[in-house]
Amino acid sequence: MGGRPAPGLPSTTPARPPVSVFRTPRTSPGVQEDALWRELVEAERRGQRRWTESWGFLKDYDPMGNKKEQEQLPEHVPLFSDTVPHSSSQVVGSRLATPLGRGLVHMDFAFVAGTRRNRPGAGLQPA
C-alpha cells in the first residue's frame, strides 16, 4: 500500500495538469471555461501540426504510391449556387411548381377559405 505502485500499467501524469484542476476562488466559471477552451484549441493545433509533420506526405501520393497531380482551381467561383435555393423561403417556393406543390396550394386555398375575410352582405352594411 504505502509507496509501492499498484500492479498493472504504470500511472502517468500529464506534463501540465488541465486548467480545470486549478480552482481559485477569484476566477469566475466563465474565465475557467475560456481558459479550458483555449487549452483544448491549442491541443488541437498541436495535434494538427504533429500530424502534418508525421503523415502530411500521404496527401501528395495516391494509395499505389504514385505522385498525385495538383488539381487546378478555377479563377472565379460564384458565391451563390444557381441550382440550390439560397434561403428557406426559396426552398419552399422552388417546390410549388411540381404537381404535389400545386395540389398543396389548391388544398390550402380550399380549406382555409373559412378564415379569409369576406365582404359582408348588403343586409349587414351600416346605414
Image: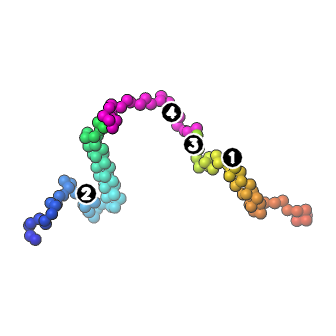
Q: Are marks 2 and 3 in contact (CB under 8 Å)?
A: no
Give the class, few, some or many, for how many residues have Cα within 10 Å of label 3's Cα (few <14, many ≥20): few
Q: What amino acid type should be assigned to the residue bearing mark 1?
A: Ala
Question: What stretch of residues is rendered in magenta?
Answer: 59-82
Left/right placement of residue 124 relative to residue 93 reads: right
Mark 2 belongs to which amino acid? Pro
Query: Closer to the N terminus: mark 2 or mark 4?
Result: 2
Give how far apart the Cα atoms at labels 1 and 2 are: 57 Å
Counting from the top left corner in percent of width and height, residue 126 is at 88, 64
Q: Nearer the viewer, residue 113 or 103?
A: 103
Helix, strand or loop at label 2? It is loop
Image side of residue 110 versus residue 126, left or right: left
Location of mark 4 (residue): 77
- Please state which of the two labelled residues, at mark 1 or mark 2, is closer to the viewer: 1
Q: Sequence order check: which comes first, mark 3 or mark 4?
A: 4
Position of residue 7 relative to residue 84, above or below, is: below
Task: Residue at 9%, 66% (x, y): give it.
Answer: 4
Q: Nearer the viewer, mark 3 or mark 4?
A: 3
On the image, which quarter does residue 50 sit in? top left
Question: Which numbered disc covers residue 81?
Answer: none
Which disc, if any, is residue 97? 1
Residue at x-position 64% and y-position 48%: 95
What secondary structure is the stretch in magenta mostly built from?
loop
